Amino acid sequence: MPVRIRRVYDPPAPDEGYRVLIDRLWPRGLRKDQLPLDAWLRELAVSDGLRRWFGHEPARWEEFRQRYRAELLAPERRPLLEELARRARDGTVTILYGARDPQHNNAVVLAELLEELSQASGR
């Protein structure tokens, strides 16, 4: 799978390819020189309003996924999204996130969307 997700606090693996942080805020407790990273794309992070509404409540997960996908597909974010999808077609992209829940976070949604875009463009 060309798109992987990994918690920012986990040690990096050697085969993670292009590593990109997608949280709006820098992860707590980490200095910038402690995190091997190729890009920090705050522009692809969840909007503050949506993040607060979601509150990492699993019961809100499906609606969060829909709303965040709509944010990601907005015209102003589309070029960054397309660039990541291109990188995923060309090699491994690892999306880094800071949330505690590995199943209900923005990286999961972004990875799904990148997979769809990279497969659609690769046809």
Image (tube, grey):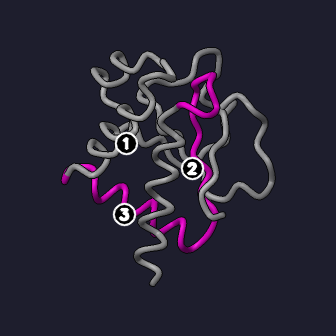
Q: Position of residue 91 (x, y in %)?
A: 62, 69
In the picture of the structure, the residue carrying the numbered disc 2 is: 38
Query: In what quadrant of the picture does the N terminus appear?
Result: bottom right
In the picture of the structure, the residue carrying the numbered disc 3 is: 82
Query: In what quadrant of the picture does the C terminus appear?
Result: bottom left
SS for tag 2?
loop
Q: Earlier in the sequence, mark 2 or mark 3?
A: 2
Residue 17 found in image quarter: bottom right
Q: CA distance from mark 1 to mark 2?
A: 15 Å
Q: CA distance from mark 2 to mark 3?
A: 17 Å
Which kind of residue does numbered mark 1 sit on?
Answer: Leu
Instruction: Classify 122 as above or below 14.
Output: below
Residue at screen point 34% across, 38% down: 68
Q: Earlier in the sequence, mark 1 or mark 2?
A: 2
Q: Position of residue 43 (x, y in %)?
A: 34, 40
Magenta highlight range: 75-104
Which kind of residue does numbered mark 3 sit on?
Answer: Glu
Q: Residues within 10 Å of mark 2 (few under 14, many from 20)?
A: few
Which kind of residue does numbered mark 2 sit on?
Answer: Asp
In the picture of the structure, the residue carrying the numbered disc 1 is: 44
Q: CA distance from mark 1 to mark 3?
A: 11 Å
Q: Residue furthest front?
A: 59
Q: Left or right? Give the position of 86 relative to 96.
A: left
